[in-house]
Image (spheres, rainbow, N blue to C red):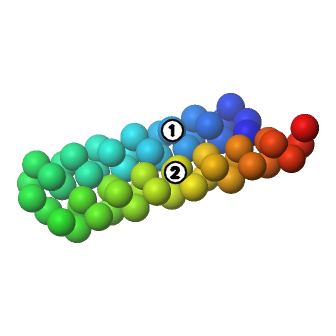
Amino acid sequence: MTIKDKFEAEAEELKGKATEAIGRVTKDDEKIGKGEAEQLVAKGKKVAEQVKDVFKK
């Protein structure tokens, strides 16, 4: 996983956390769901890159 990929995945996860937090404050279920989904996508990218790294060794 390159530094750029790690940074992008972290940024996407933080964006998801922020979106979820805003949704919780405003009681907007759609934003909460969107934030959770963004976090899952970012975590999926991290796992995929970690698997790639394992097989490179």
Placement of 51 over or under 36, stated as above or below = above
Callout 1: SS: helix
Closer to the N terminus: mark 1 or mark 2?
1
Q: What residue did someone put label 1 on?
A: 10
Residue at 56% x, 42% y is: 8
Distance from Cα at disc 1 to Cα at disc 2: 7 Å
Q: Outermost residue toward the bottom? A: 30
Which quadrant: the N terminus?
A: top right
Q: Are marks 1 and 2 in contact (CB under 8 Å)?
A: yes
Q: Quadrant of residue 15?
A: top left
Side (left or right) of 28 relative to 57: left
Residue at 55% x, 44% y is: 9
Q: Outermost residue toward the left? A: 26
Q: Position of residue 14 (x, y in %)?
A: 40, 40
Side (left or right) of 12 relative to 49: left
Which amino acid type corresponds to the residue marked 1 in the rendered image? Glu
Which amino acid type corresponds to the residue marked 2 in the rendered image? Ala
Q: Position of residue 5 (x, y in %)?
A: 65, 41
Callout 2: SS: helix
Q: Position of residue 27 (x, y in %)?
A: 9, 58
Q: Position of residue 33 (x, y in %)?
A: 29, 64
Marking on residue 42: 2
Side (left or right) of 47 relative to 10: right
Q: Quadrant of residue 36?
A: bottom left
Residue at 9% x, 54% y is: 26
